[in-house]
Amino acid sequence: MCVFFVLLVFAACNNNKTSATDTQQAPAQTADATAPGKKNILFFGDSLTAGYGLDDEQEAFPGVIQRRIDSLKLPYHVINAGVSGETTAGGLGRIDWTLKHKVDIFILELGANDGLRGVPVSETKKNLHTIITKVKAKYPDAKIILAGMMVPPSMGADYANSFKAVFPAIAEKDKVELIPFLLDHVAGIPKLNQGDGIHPTAEGAKIVADNVWVVLKGDL
C-alpha cells in the first residue's frame, strides 16, 4: 500500500510543479553528440529519469548507469531525455525531435503520470506503442527497453490492474524488453526517497539503476 501511496503523491507533485511548457522542453543532455567510437543509450522519461530534486543531475539513475558503463570500459554514451511531469502524450509530442540523435538502445520510462491522472488505459497504451513504432522506424536495429509502472488501488481496482497490464502487453506485442517495475525496492521506503517522500535520493537512484541494469546489461 505504501508503494502505491507514494506513486499517487508523485503524480500530484508533478501536476503542481510542472507547467505544460516545461513538458515540451527536453533537457540539455539531449544536445550531446555521440561520443567518438561510442553508441548511444537514450533514456526517454519523466522526473525519475531527469533526476528531479537531486543536487547533481548525474546522480539520476541514467547517470549512475553511465558511471557503471565507464567503469567497465564499455563503448556506450548515455543521453538523458527525461522531462519532469511528462505524460505519454507529451513524450509522443517530442519523440521525433529527440530521435534526431542516433539511438542504439532506447529506454522508455513513461506512463505513471498518465495512470495517476486517470488517462484512459487505451490512450496510454496507444501512445507507448506509437513511440516505440517511431523508434523502430527511425532506428530498426535499436534495442528497446520499456520500464513498467503501477498506479494505486485508489484509482479503482479495475483501472489499476488494467494499467499494470499495459506494460507487459506492450512489451510482448512490440517485442521489446521489459523492466517489470522501475521503482522496485525504492518506492515507499523513506530513507531511499527525498524529503518530499516522492523522488528517489541519490542512494535510491542507485537501486533504480540496478533494476534497469538487470535488463540492460544483456544488450551491451
Image (spheres, rainbow, N blue to C red):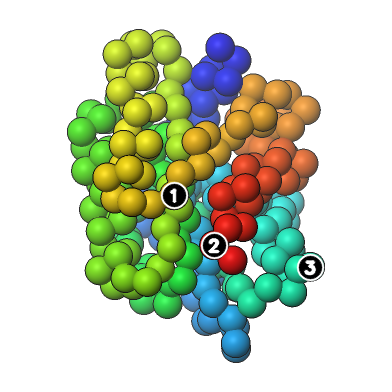
Three-letter amino acid code at disc 1? Glu
What type is the residue that disc 2 sits on? Answer: Asp
x, y (%) of residue 23?
39, 51
- 24 sits left or right of 120 in the view: right
Residue 11: give its label: none
- Upstream in the sequence, badge 2 or badge 1? 1
* Residue at 60% over, 73% down: 77
Position of the C terminus, as image quadrant, is: bottom right
CA gap between label 2 and label 1 equals 10 Å
Mark 2 touches mark 1? (CB < 8 Å): yes
Which circle, 1 or 3, is nearer the viewer?
Answer: 1
Residue 154 percent location from the top left of the image: 41, 11
Question: Which residue lies under the disc numbered 1?
Answer: 177
Name the residue beneath numbered marker 2: 219
**Numbered-mark total:** 3
Residue 195, can we see it?
yes
Q: Is residue 178 left or right of residue 128?
A: right
Question: Disc 3 vs disc 2: which is toward the camera?
Answer: 2
In this view, the residue in front, 219 or 201, is 219
